[in-house]
Amino acid sequence: MFSALGLFKGIPCPKQYECSLPSCIFLHDSPITSVDVQDAAVPAKEYDPFSAGEVHSPPPKRRRLASPARPKGVENAVKSAAHDSQLPDQPHLPKPAPTIPVVKSGHASTAVTLPTVRSTSRTAPASIARTVSPPRSRDSIQLGARNATKPTKTETLTPRNVSKAPAMLKTRLAVLQKLHEQMQVQNLKLASVDDQRKALMLDNQELIKYALDEEEAATKLGENIYKNAMAQKVLRIKKMTTEEWVATVSIWTGTARQIVAEQIGTNAAAELVSTGLGTLDEQIAVLKHLRTPLEGLEQFNYVTSKPSDKEIASAKAGLAAASGWETCDRCGTRFQVFPGRDEHGKLTSHGKCRYHLAKPYCAIGAKTDRILGQSEATYRCCNKSAGSEGCSEAPTHVFYVKDPKRLASILQWDHTPAKNDIRRRQPVSFDCEMGYTTFGMEVIRLTAVSWPDDKLLLDYLVRPYGEILDLNTRFSGVTQEAFANAPFYQLGSGPDAALETLHLHKVESPAAARELLFQHLSPDTPLIGHAIENDLNVCRIIHPFVVDTVLLYPHPRGLPIRYGLKMLSQKYLLRTIQSAGEEGHDSKEDAVATGDLVSKKVAEKWNAMRREGWTFVEGMLTAPHEVKPTDAPGQLVPML
């Protein structure tokens, strides 16, 4: 007989408890307990996924006991503990039989006492009795007190981690410390004032967070612009007056402190984007030299003429032949759209949409790419490689239509109508928010402010022509609750009637919203916007006098590549916008920022024109060759 090598010690013995070998080479557990016998007596029930009754979770696992018998005192203590810990909403289990026979070969049947404790009787977790705080609403965030604006976590004066650092850590740290130092100097100036501006002082943690926010925003400009942008930012903060610092802090901290800044003076923020011109007529005269002609830019979706009836008919025929098949704008899936819903009540086919929030990004080539090869493109939203399954999910697929002929089949373009009155109309800066419908992407909010004083002219929600697939809240800022509960505005009841209430009104169609905008425009009124072709196309407007900040601040590589409004505002206005995250953008905030960017360009243009010899003569902007000196020193008259 060979000695056992232990090769079978992990395999259960085939005879289990009937094995009579004194030293078996197989695995033998401890003697069977009464709980195991009871489980064997009750067959397990299979889960029925089609059952109409209540679906319960599977029973929890029970710990195997070391021995079947326990002292009587311990058993009584366990019984009482199980009775005390039973939850009120759990039914009491029936008591099992006190004994059950256990049969072994060669021995008489013996009775084993069953314990009365079941593993389903457990103490209630602490989370059941814990109260859950409701989520904060958007109104509470905007109208919160000073404590609501404080950082939620403690941060140190160390640069935050970014996906692509524009400089080495020690360089970023040195720049950040310089920025924080100048912010501290400006913040200490508020300690010596005795008016309401003292309430705008930031504590140490808020100063650190402010500096970190500004430095993190500058990292998105790229390594070639980062150092210059931060140097200019430090210099500007160093030269700020107290009023300018108050205006800057009020914009960063939000609505609660912005109200205090407005009480101090409404002109504080305007000084940051001053054009250097005295009257509105002078500013408009220089603005006319910034007109961006759209002729020749039709390939970049700028529409300069109406599609003909023949082109519209051709677009409708092609749409009918396609039978509603589109390509998803987010995940690229081919799906079918059912305007008016199909027989099953669906608006789209192919179920839910899985997509990435960001576009694939490939790092700039390094010296090692020639040897190791170029790095793989990844998504910044989840750091997954290009082509991977999306990290976000939406109920339906969506699509975006850019063809002017197809857009005209829904609503035809219209030229800005001429006005019979002689009322002077200020330049208008406007912005639209769009959502996805069964007709593509349509306008769902229209906002316009006057330039350069940023007075609100109109701000309405718009009911689109198609059924809404996705309000695109992450960008539009329009929620389902706000859109559904908005009261309708009756066209003709006065342009300022809806502005007197706190909640936005809703107009019945994009055509009605366009008519409201036309009330503030004439063909010679400058219309200001950022990537204005998108806003003009969803409103179907052809305007002869357009000022587009995308063309005023061009990208070095040219169209269709362009800078975003958030980056331009951060770089040139020292202002952070579109920072609400999942709550989306604010079209009024975007319209104001766009107008202020134009004001910066007007100031630059006027400085350049003055150096060339341009001047204002009797309120008229006059070229150098159109003026002649007079006998009186310092006076000029226009040449006839």
Image (cartoon, grey):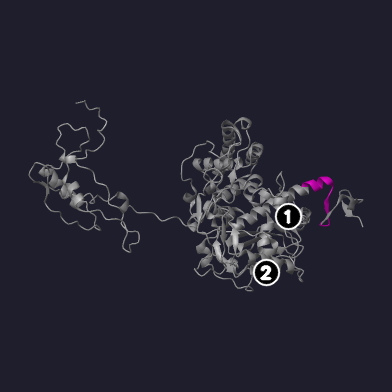
| The stretch drawn in magenta includes residue 609 | yes
- In magenta, the rendered stretch is 607-619
Q: Which mark is residue 515?
A: 2
Amino acid marked by disc 2? Glu
Q: Which residue occupies the extreme front position in the image?
A: 1
Residue under pointer 1: 299
Q: Position of residue 90 (x, y in %)?
A: 24, 57
Among the 4 quarters of the image, the one containing residue 524: bottom right
Q: Position of residue 485 (x, y in %)?
A: 51, 67
Using a 10 Å C-alpha cutoff, classify the residue at mark 2 as few (fewer than 14 neighbours), some (14 to 19) or many (20 or more).
Answer: some
* In the image, residue 425 above or below residue 1: below
> Residue 567 versus residue 230: which sits nearer the camera?
567
Question: Which of disc 1 and disc 2 is earlier in sequence?
Answer: 1
Residue under the point 15% across and 40% down: 18
Amino acid marked by disc 1? Gln
Q: Is residue 424 left or right of residue 30?
A: right
